[in-house]
Image: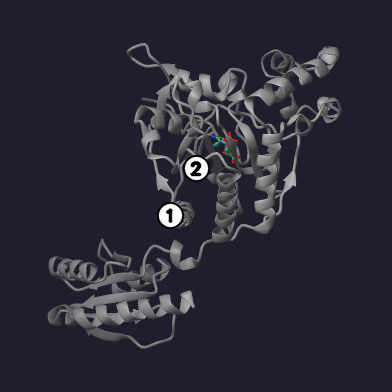
């Protein structure tokens, strides 16, 4: 084969050390989720195309222009998931999970959208998503927003703004749709091609238009907030009260409608000023009608998804010890590689929490020590001829000016275990 083969446009490799930042990000988010009592769900990347066309909406940008859809060898139309809500709902119905309500689920993984790639926007990107099934009240909406706040705190991300709105019930939306249609209809000549299509199929989406020429027309459109019925108003007020009580700052944005069609009541987005045009790091809302629209018994639901590439761009660098390769770099300066390897394996068994990188490929003591230093490890662990003969290990601190000491396996592991425990307790103080 000739010609260079490269990764697909908008899809990227994640190499070390960046992959360590990803692991740190994912681990931190998973810890917060576990702390809130959420459980993980894993669904396939490929789904039947109809799953997305029927849930995300025929006139959404995703369905109209962005899906990776193809026929497989049987002629079935499949789509690489552009998001995780539809798949979670499919799994929920398929496995009869309505027997286990309420359910608090989370997922993470790659999503695929054929958008124009730019900073913060990719064709393969990663989301961490939450879907909660079976709870109707504003309390769970508030819990999700508090959970996102806990994410930002755990990651050390500051400066995000929360925008929030209520779309009301499906009936409110239907009524508001008519109101909007009547408002935009006389201005047809000013609307662009996208907005004309939306006018027919879903006029709410015109409010989401990024076309600056429409900004004024949109700003004068009737407000959805005025169209809310009493129940929707009470739900929204309940949510805002709880957020205020918990000290969450927010901005009510009556034009926030979201790009996916399945939302009802609460919608929200967390935005940043630090990433340019791709400023939404996390977004979601309630979708009480979606499960029923697939022919199942109605179950209320609410969720959100955060874009991991965007979170990573905002993440302060993780602590250095999390992104170096090893705690101990084993230097093998003897002529018995087989016995050396048994000693390294014994060490690994005795010290399961430590990252132990064993030198391979020979070379002088000096060059191995250089590699030990470059690995970022805290200690070099030297097994020279003398140590090998006595089955001992010489521990040389690489980051502190302390003398080298020699230990047998038991004393070495006792020493390092005690040290790790002492450091953990000072950290948690
Ligand atoms: P979404 O607003 O389409 O919602 O996406 C959520 C987040 O994914 C965005 O705020 C953004 O951070 C990230 N994202 C989206 N597209 C890209 C892209 N091309 N490149 C990088 N990041 C991107 C949903 O997907 C809903 N399923 C959220 C939800 C869950 N609603 C209820 N439950």
Residue ranking furthest to the front: 230
Q: From the viewer's side, name the closer residue of 294 and 114.
A: 294
Q: How many residues crowd mark 1 within 10 Å: few (<14), some (14–19), many (20+)?
A: few
Q: How many residues crowd mark 2 within 10 Å: few (<14), some (14–19), many (20+)?
A: many
Residue 205 image offset from top left, x and y in percent: 70, 24
Query: Could you say whether the residue bearing mark 2 is in a helix, strand or loop?
Result: strand
Does the Cβ of the disc 1 residue fall within 8 Å of ligand 1? no
> Residue 286: in sight, yes or no?
yes
Residue 130 numbered tag: 2
Going 35% across and 73% down the picture, which residue do you hit? 369
The type of colouring in the image is: one colour
In which quadrant of the rendered image does the N terminus lie? top left
Residue 254 image offset from top left, x and y in percent: 76, 36
Relative to 336, say whether 174 is above or below: above
Residue ranking furthest to the bottom: 403
> Residue 275: in sight, yes or no?
no
Residue 34 numbered tag: 1
Q: Is residue 333 left or right of residue 241?
A: left
Residue 273 image offset from top left, x and y in percent: 72, 48
Does the Cβ of the disc 2 residue fall within 8 Å of ligand 1? yes
Going 74% across and 17% down the picture, which residue do you hit? 178
Q: Is residue 334 left or right of residue 51?
A: left
Disc tally is: 2
Relative to 296, say whether 201 is above or below: above
Q: Report how far apart the C-alphas of labels 2 and 1 lie in the structure.
A: 12 Å
Q: From the viewer's side, name the closer residue of 201 and 159.
A: 201
Residue 246 numbered tag: none
């Amino acid at each position: 084969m000739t010609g260079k083969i490269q990764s697909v446009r908008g899809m990227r490799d994640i190499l070390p050390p960046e992959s360590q930042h990803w692991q740190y990000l994912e681990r931190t988010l998973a810890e917060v989720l576990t702390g809130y009592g959420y459980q993980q769900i894993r669904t396939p990347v490929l789904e039947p195309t109809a799953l997305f066309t029927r849930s995300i909406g025929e006139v959404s940008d995703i369905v109209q222009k962005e899906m990776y859809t193809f026929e497989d060898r049987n002629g079935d139309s499949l789509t690489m998931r552009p998001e995780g809500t539809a798949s979670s709902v499919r799994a929920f119905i398929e496995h009869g999970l309505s027997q286990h309500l309420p359910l608090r689920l989370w997922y993470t993984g790659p999503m695929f959208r054929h958008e124009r790639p730019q900073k913060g926007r990719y064709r393969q990107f990663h989301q961490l998503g939450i879907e909660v099934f079976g709870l109707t009240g504003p309390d769970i909406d508030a819990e999700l927003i508090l959970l996102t706040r806990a994410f930002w705190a755990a990651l050390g991300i500051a400066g995000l703004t929360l925008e929030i709105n209520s779309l009301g019930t499906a009936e409110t939306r239907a009524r508001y749709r008519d109101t909007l249609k009547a408002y935009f209809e006389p201005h047809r000549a000013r609307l662009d091609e996208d907005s004309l299509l939306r006018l027919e199929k879903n006029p709410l989406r015109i409010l989401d238009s990024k076309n600056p020429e429409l900004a004024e027309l949109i700003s004068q459109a009737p407000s959805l907030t005025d169209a809310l019925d009493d129940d929707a108003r009470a739900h929204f007020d309940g949510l805002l009260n709880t957020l205020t009580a918990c000290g969450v700052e927010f901005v009510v944005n009556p034009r926030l409608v979201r790009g996916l069609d399945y939302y009802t009541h609460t919608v929200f987005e967390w935005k940043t000023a630090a990433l340019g045009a791709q400023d939404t790091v996390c977004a979601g809302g309630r979708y009480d009608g979606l499960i029923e629209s697939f022919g199942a018994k109605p179950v209320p639901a609410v969720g959100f998804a955060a874009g991991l590439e965007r979170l990573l761009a905002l993440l302060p660098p993780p602590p250095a010890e999390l992104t170096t390769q090893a705690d101990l770099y084993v230097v093998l300066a003897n002529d018995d590689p087989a016995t050396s390897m048994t000693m390294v394996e014994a060490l690994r068994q005795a010290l399961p929490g430590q990252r132990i990188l064993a030198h391979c490929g020979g070379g002088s003591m000096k060059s191995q020590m250089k590699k030990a230093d470059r690995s970022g490890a805290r200690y070099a662990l030297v097994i020279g001829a003398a140590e090998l003969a006595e089955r001992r290990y010489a521990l040389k601190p690489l980051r502190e000016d302390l003398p080298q000491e020699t230990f047998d396996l038991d004393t070495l592991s006792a020493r390092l275990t005690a040290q790790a425990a002492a450091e953990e307790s000072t950290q948690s103080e």
